Image: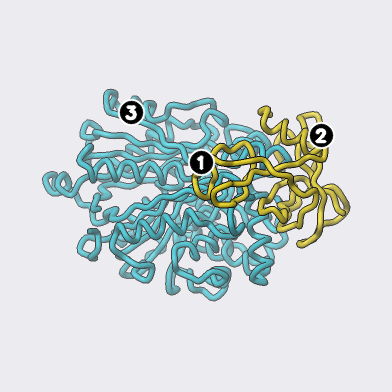
Amino acid sequence: MPSWFNELLDAVEAGDAFYLSCADCGASSLPPRDVCPECGSLELSEQELSTTATVETYTPIHVTIPAFSGETPYTVVVAGFDEGVRLTGQFVGDEVEMGDEVRLGVGEHDEGRYLTFEAV
Amino acid sequence: MRVNVAGAYSTKFGKHPESSARELLTDACLGALEDADVSPVEIDGIHVGNFMGELTDDQGHMGVMTADYLGTTGVPATRSESACASSGWAVREAAQAVESGTADVALVAGVEMMHATGIERLTDALANAADNEYENSCGLTFPGIFALIARDYMDEFGVTREELAEVTVKNRANGVDNPIAQYQEGVTVDDVLEARPIAPPVGMLDSCPITDGASAVLLVSPEYADENGLDAPASVVGSGASSASLALQDRDVLSRTRAAERAAERAYEHAGVAPEDVDVAEVHDCFTIAEILAVESLGFFERGEGAYAAVEGETAPDGRIPVNTSGGLIAKGHPVGATGVAQVVELAKQIEGEHPTQVEGAETAVAHNVGGSGASTTVHVLQAEGAGGGS
């Protein structure tokens, strides 16, 4: 993994998750951007991101990639934060439904670390 | 724009374990040249679409390879890569080259050899079209991304899996008479619902198959066609392309393909036509949900109504706007780097009146080719000679 993603994972693990906010248009985005995807401004600053988010969609994965060989089925969710960004992570828990509240975290397997969402 | 389609050809789509990218590319190109009755020595530009040759069969640099194997070494040749829209992009570049006068005779081809590796490695290679850190690292797969989109759409509009399945039922029925189609047998809604899950709500039969294949078209200027007495009834008259965020999570609405909406708007404007002028379309149905989003993005149906297009027969061969008379990606197959060209091959046949599932009086046709989860899209408008438009 590139260092920017490891830094994001470190921040999530430390309870210091962050996103990027544009000083010019107010749009929210995610690292490692230099340019605001909404307005092209270079005035982006790191802001604190909530630890919980709302499930907007999900899917149980049955056919996977080599890095997750033997781990199926597992569920991937996209969850939205109040700050205006979404993240994609693997679900930790028994069952997930649309609109569920989930907590951002970090998981690990032999192939490395990844973002998770745990049932709240 | 008016660039004539002088020749068009697709190899059989399916499994080609005894063949290779260079052999299928050569077969497709020679087929298109023979269809056009043009010698390879006339070619002055080669554009090849291929997504993942390096990962599946350890072969890149396919533009040059094509020139070499056609005996046209010395001709400018390159490869275009925009994931599954690689050869839609190649069509656009070749059409622009002819329109600008850079080339009089441009060959466009596409190929993918998807059986050259195992299913997990292939799934991994396809996932390169997504965002490696934000999507792949947590185990999200490509069918998984379309499943995320499908669930969002189904939740918003109250659409069922049975309704999605009607896309497969229609396209598999259309594939029956297409001699190049990978699947030439029909299926029922129950077959689709009972198929093995890949990433629910996407099951095996909601998905296009794994396909080897190649396609090619020969694009020429109207002047070249006239001077050489070529029979080229179909022309590319409009090209549009656009992009959206690499990762699905960054899109404003998860189940809207904005790149396709913008590409369609630009292609229609370029061609001087409107969605209601279109007689037949080949769209990028890599999954059932993808055809539904395609017919909405192309302006054939309002958002939320695309799900009922196949259910109500509106996109059937005898419907209001026939979609994927070839069988689409779901039945014809999806050798990803060949798909954009393959769509133009099918539509040229429709305009020539020689398609196995012919739409009566088809004069204006649209090809819609998507890369990634909708992050890139090309849209092309084809028309018959004298059909109007084509400014």
Can residue A80 be spotted in the picture? no
Q: Going from the N terminus, do you reach mark 1 or mark 3 first?
A: 3
**Front-lying residue, B179 or B118:** B118
Query: Which percent across, then down, holds residue B163?
Result: 63, 69
Q: Which mark is residue A108?
A: 2
Which residue ends up furthest to the front in the rendered image?
A23
Q: Is residue B155 left or right of residue B128?
A: right
Kind of residue sitting beneath label 3: Ala
Q: Is residue B264 left or right of residue A11?
A: left
Can residue A39 be spotted in the picture? yes
Q: CA distance from mark 2 to mark 3?
A: 47 Å
Q: Residue at x 77, y 36 (%)?
A: A11
Relative to residue A88, is residue B201 depicted above or below?
Answer: below
Quadrant where the image shows the C terminus of chain A: bottom right
The mark lying in front, picked from 1 and 3, is 1
At label 3, counting other C-alpha atoms closer than 10 Å, the crowd grade (few under 14, some 14-19, many 20 or more) is many
Kind of residue sitting beneath label 2: Glu
Which residue ends up furthest to the bottom in the rendered image?
B312
Q: Residue at x 70, y 50 (%)?
A: B198
Q: Which mark is residue B67?
A: 3
Which residue ends up furthest to the left in the rendered image?
B227
Relative to residue B163, is residue B202 depicted above or below?
Answer: above
Which of the chains bears the disc numbered 3? B
The mark lying in front, picked from 2 and 3, is 2
Q: CA distance from mark 1 to mark 3?
A: 22 Å
Residue under disc 1 on the same chain as residue under disc 3: yes
Relative to residue B67, is residue B251 depicted above or below?
Answer: below
Q: Residue at x 40, y 50 (%)?
A: B241
Which of the chains bears the disc numbered 1? B
Element marked by disc 2: strand
Q: Which mark is residue B83?
A: 1
At label 2, counting other C-alpha atoms closer than 10 Å, the crowd grade (few under 14, some 14-19, many 20 or more) is few
